[in-house]
Amino acid sequence: MTKIGVYRASIMIGVLCFAFFILSGCTSSVEHRQQNYKYKGQVTLLMKGPDKSRSDITFEISTINIVSASGTASEILSTPLMVNSSDMEGRQITLGEGLFPEGAYNRLQVHVKKASIRKKDSQANLALPPEGIEVAVNINVKRNQNTTLFLNWNSDASIQEGYLFKPLFTVRGKSPELGSLLMYVTNQDANNVSAINRQSGEITATVMVGRRPGGIAVSGGKVYVANSGSGSISVIDPITNTVDNEIPIRFGREPVDVAIARVASGKDILFVANYGSNNISIVDASTLQELEKVDVGKGPIAIAVDPPISELTGNRFLSFEDASTLRSYRENFVNVYVVNRESNNVSIVRVDIRNQSSEEVITVDVDWNPIALDVDYKKGKVYVANYGSDKLSVIDILKIVKGNSAGSVSTINNIGRNVVGVISDPKFERLYLLKERPGEIVIIRPFADSFDSLKSIMPPIMGTIRVGNMPRSFVLGPEGRKIYVVNRGSNSISVVDKTTKKEEQTIPVGANPYDITVFRR
């Protein structure tokens, strides 16, 4: 065949392949991965160490396989992991996680590469069982659901005949938890949510949600998760820790955050920030239907709403007149505050409570690269964290309500850059700022408006608290004593004591955690 003939044949083959691709509905590699995601279930394997260990044992796990009832073995841990009994005292770690076909699974194959024990000043190697190590389990993996396996390791009973290491694992089931004790963390790269008992500091359940879960909020006994990768809101029942419903977001793209307003007794409205389409969706939580879309600035990344009117009860920060103004306003309207990262401003959407529809959008400029916010209704302020600036923007809610948006924004200066979160603590006259680099909480003093001279003389920073790597978000516990920090760089939660100003505990969570919320009494 001539070169021209070969060339024509190549073109013909290419055309035929393209036609076949179109007609047969061939999918891309991304679509194949999405299909695999849809038709599999997720398994999370957790291990808890002994409360107290008399033996100082170290062993290396090379791999762990989960075996189906038909005998098919699949890796759930492929990265070697070193485990030490002293380090594991009272701690829980994640051994592995993955997607697996639906069906029954009855055992784990734990491959231990080496083990040793330390006695006094010497260390001795331990023998390993020639038949390997297997752990009996009994689970049924279901499509689009997570099954969490809890292993307890008894280190003192793991050595036989004084030289043979055969780790004793017991499998326990998921126990019911009080919703008031739970906090929830979204894990973006794991496509799930970790439910954590705040008292024990342990993961009690893992909930499989949509792709790339981001912002998360709770209200009315439900947990709402914004899934930017699948364009939906997952609704979690905290009693069963399963997804009750999936709300498709059709009016926007890449939903990254969600906020909830209670507009009547038992009536919640969701507000969803859609980063990819520069708008927000208003969703009825009862019917699970989108009611409206509202255009905002570019790159809406964070969203918050006015709290209930009860927040104004017994207020000692606002005058009687100002508190009455806010109370009267909130009887008819709720403000939705949207941080627009790419246009360096905040959109304030006024929503009519009676018909759950938007009435007006006010835009106020803030500083460079805004990324997070917090509403302090007791003081009538909204604090905006600007990642690319060393200024914290402060929006006066009363001025917005009264129509004076032009003079509604002030700043707290010299706080440092790389701030990704802000929490107001009016009870103790403090603001907590979360800095991505270095990983720390910065405590600052927000001066009252009447002390303008002090703002320029006295430094606002009162202290710092070190946390994990690359923190992304944080939340104040309902009792007001602890701060819980999401560390993206170290896949963990830092539990910080406000009184001692120290990190008192680290809780491992899933891959690339993003946001956190807690149930409040």
Image (cartoon, grey):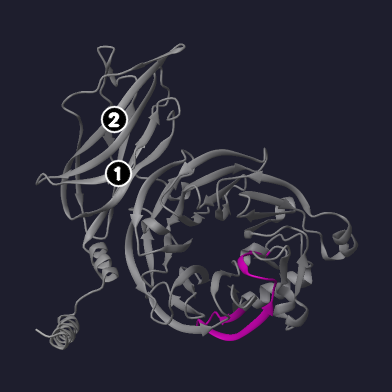
Q: Is residue 63 left or right of residue 331?
A: left
Residue visible at 21% across and 56% down in the picture = 142
Residue 357 image position (x, y, % from top left): 51, 84
Q: Amino acid at mark 1?
A: Ser
Q: Is residue 352 magenta?
A: yes
Splitting the image into 4 quarters, where does residue 116 fall? top left
Q: Amino acid at mark 2?
A: Lys
**Which residue is label 1 attached to?**
78
- Asked if the residue under mark 2 is in contact with the one under mark 1, i.e. CB atoms within 8 Å, the reply is no
**Which residue is label 2 attached to?**
113
Residue 182 image position (x, y, % from top left): 45, 49
Q: Is residue 82 left or right of residue 146?
A: right
Instruction: Give the mark nearer the N terminus: 1 vs 2.
Output: 1
Q: Is residue 332 visible?
A: no
Residue 374 image position (x, y, % from top left): 63, 63
Above or below, 412 against 462 in this view is below
What's the distance in space between the residues labelled 1 and 2, CA to CA?
Answer: 13 Å
Instruction: Please name the predominant secondary structure of the magenta segment in the image.
Output: strand
Residue visible at 35% across and 55% down in the picture = 207
Closer-to-camera residue (287/27): 27
Residue 470 image position (x, y, % from top left): 55, 52
Tell how many labels. Answer: 2
Tag 2, which secondary structure? strand
The stretch of residues the image draws in magenta is: 348-377
Q: Residues within 10 Å of mark 1 (few under 14, many from 20)?
A: few
Q: Residues within 10 Å of mark 2 (few under 14, many from 20)?
A: some
Splitting the image into 4 quarters, where does residue 333 fall? bottom right
Q: Is residue 211 left or right of residue 277?
A: left
Q: Is residue 144 visible?
A: yes
Residue visible at 83% across and 66% down in the picture = 449
